[in-house]
Image (cartoon, grey):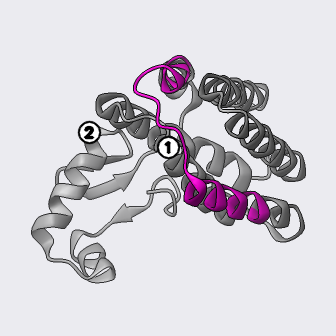
Amino acid sequence: MLDYPPGTQLSEIALAQEFGISRTPMRRVLARLEEEGLVHSVHGVGTIVTDANITELEQAYRLRVELTALTGRLDPVLPDTVFLDRLQGLIDRAAEMAVSGTPQSFTVLDMEVFEALLELTANEPLRQVLERLYYQTKRLWLVRAIKAELDLQEEYEIFLHELEAIQLAIRSGDLNAVAQIQQAHISMSFNRLLQKKD
């Protein structure tokens, strides 16, 4: 629900048509999104996109910071050359972001980076929890960026430096360092959001 602003009323039928699926799986998707707190169903009104409230997401952010450190210790997966090539491609795109990036394109890239780095642990329960926390909290950044409450140039540069540091840690075979770099950047990102808190 990253693409829909808070307060948007969603139509099950329209969404099913948009994504080319029947209403039954769309109903399941909306139920899952409601569990995640991304939408709220109001009887007689419909499904409404919820606001990205930093106070409500603070605990999720803090848990995400702590659990990210575990990715370097629980069932770590050493990356192969295919992964390293993929990471280089993501870094190249991050470098271009400073020139032509938008909050939406940055978010897409950030999601791809998150999914790639999640492959560095084979611990499935940890992966599932981190994925849930990521998607709960990511839209908060996007909402703030769209509202021009963040210095996007600075955000893009920080992101690029994070990826370059991760690449160096991977090349040295230190997956604990990769996890610590990610942990530090999630924490710093959240602190920047807190500074912009209304």
Question: Which secondary structure is most common in the magenta stretch?
Answer: helix
Q: Position of residue 154 (x, y in %)?
A: 89, 45
Image-quadrant location for residue 196: top right
Residue drawn at 17 percent across, 50 percent down: 43
Identified by mark 1, the residue type is: Asp
Q: Are the residues flagged by discs 1 and 2 in contact, CB closer than 8 Å?
A: no
Image-quadrant location for residue 190: top right
Image-quadrant location for residue 169: top right
Does residue 138 sit above or below 45 in this rendering? Answer: above
Does residue 30 sit above or below 132 in this rendering? Answer: below
Q: Position of residue 95 (x, y in %)?
A: 84, 61
In the image, which disc is placed on residue 51?
Answer: 1
The magenta segment is: 66-93
Q: Is residue 72 left or right of residue 86?
A: left
Task: Reply yes or no: does residue 74 show up in magenta.
Answer: yes
Q: Is residue 131 left or right of residue 102?
A: left
Local SS, label 1: loop
State which quarter of the image contains the C terminus.
top right
In the image, which disc is placed on residue 35?
Answer: 2
Residue 198 in sight here: no
Task: Reply yes or no: does residue 17 show up in magenta.
Answer: no
Identified by mark 2, the residue type is: Glu
